[in-house]
Amino acid sequence: MPLITSAGIGSGLDLESIIQASVDAEDVPKMNAFVKKEESLKVELSAVGEIKGALSKLQDTIEKLADPDNFNKRIANITQPTSDDGDLISVTPTSNITPGDFKVEVVELAQGSRAVSNDAVPPIFTSTDDVVSASGGTLSFSAGPDKSFDLTVDAGATLADLRDAINDSDDNFGITANIVNTGTESKLVLTSSVSGTGNDLVITNDNAELDNVSTEANAGGAGGIGIAAGSEAKSAVIKVDGIEITNDTNTFKDAVQDMTITAKRQSVDGETAKLSVEYDRESATKLIDEFIANYNNVIGQLGFQSRVGKPLNSDATIRSLSAQLVNTLSTNLTDAGPFESIYDIGIGVKKDGYLEKSSLVRSLNTAMDENFDDIGKAFAGEDGLAKQFEKLLGNYVDSDGIMKQRENNLNTQIEDLEDDVINHEFRMGELEGRLRKQYSGLDVLLAQMQSTQTYLSAQLSSLPGFTRNNS
């Protein structure tokens, strides 16, 4: 049987078009249905994603509203004295401090002690290369009852070597060593960071050769380093509303209960800084504004994605969510002072479901003025509004929530649809193969018949008296 490589070659008929039309009749409607279904699923998935995203943003805000600490913040407003000398104090309040007004004066700043080589004739050291001890030994440093360390001095160590050894010691609690050269002598200067009256730097030794770099001689008495008047360790002194307070450092913790005051410089002529501690209303207001904005964003998405022509129109899940949001807003508040509902703190609901700041009952500012602590309880209390929203939103946007399940289901349908397309394309390939096989046989048969006809016509035309009819 002759080989037909393309349908219609043998017969001359347009069998390729016939095969294509037959396949298209099966393929095109089905593929159009697949495309339409995929577009519908993706549009629905996008709509669900937009709502889920809006709910997640609201959930983030709700988590902050559910934290009582976000309503317990305090701010300290400081009016520094008019001076070119810089700030007098800085302040860090805690959430437990009671609001109030104070005047703070810095009587004296704390300082550590400063020990310097004594004046002597001849000078103790004339050069940084002078040897401190020929045989070496141990210097013991201390400042107050809790700070001390020992330093081994090598035999033949110079004054410069000693300076470096002090500064480089890992056990050093806060002593800085320097050398001041006057032109005729080199003085060792040791500055301690340990402040507070009575915490002067003390240096002792176990070898009399080291007396020149000690505050106390090995055999008793004064050493070669001394602390001059005015260079002793001092405590800081401040006055809060005239009450004098003393501290080893410039940082006063709980001088005013639950507040840390840091003295920055000494007052000039008794000048004071005015300190006013208040509730951090601005922070709380911003958080409530964020709640209103993100709640309204959810309401807007629910309305937009469920309107006529949208994939979630008349969707039961969306209707249920909308109703639950309204019910949660209407939660009766307990243990929140005079606030029995969200409307009592100055938040209202418009006819279209959006939230707004309202003064129908009282304004938010008035509520903060009168009962700031209770606003925190209204949101972050055990049965507060934020706690109720946490439960609701968790049911929808958590990893096992309704919206996540909805997304998973839609993604599964899209994946299944892709498999259906692959299976359909395989079936169409099989159909085309069958049609080609069938039409190939027809093509061969027609080609044979045409060949036979041609042969018979040739034979007949060669017979005597045969006349071809050209008509």
Image (cartoon, rainbow, N blue to C red):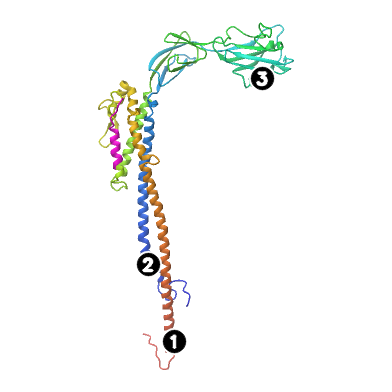
Which residue carries the number 2 mark? 22
Q: Position of residue 143 (x, y in %)?
A: 59, 13
Image vertical order of residue 375 relative to residue 417, above or below: above
- Dot 1 or dot 3: first in sequence order is 3
Please tell me how crowded label 1 is: few (under 14), some (14-19), or many (20+) other residues with Cα within 10 Å.
Answer: few
Mark 1 belongs to which amino acid?
Ala
- Dot 2 or dot 3: first in sequence order is 2
Which residue carries the number 1 mark? 458
Q: Quadrant of residue 183?
A: top right
From mark 1 to mark 3, how far is it between C-alphas? 124 Å
Q: Position of residue 306 (x, y in %)?
A: 30, 44
Mark 1 vs mark 3, foreground winner is 3
Mark 1 vs mark 2, foreground winner is 2
From mark 1 to mark 2, how far is it between C-alphas? 38 Å
Q: Position of residue 422 (x, y in %)?
A: 42, 58
Residue 136 magenta-drawn?
Answer: no
Which residue carries the number 3 mark? 165
Residue that extends furthest to the bottom in the rendered view of this protein:
464
Q: Quadrant of the C terminus?
A: bottom left
Image vertical order of residue 245 relative to residue 437, above or below: above
Please tell me how crowded label 2 is: few (under 14), some (14-19), or many (20+) other residues with Cα within 10 Å.
Answer: some
Secondary structure mainly formed by the magenta segment: helix
Residue 334 magenta-drawn?
Answer: yes
Magenta residues, start to end: 319-335
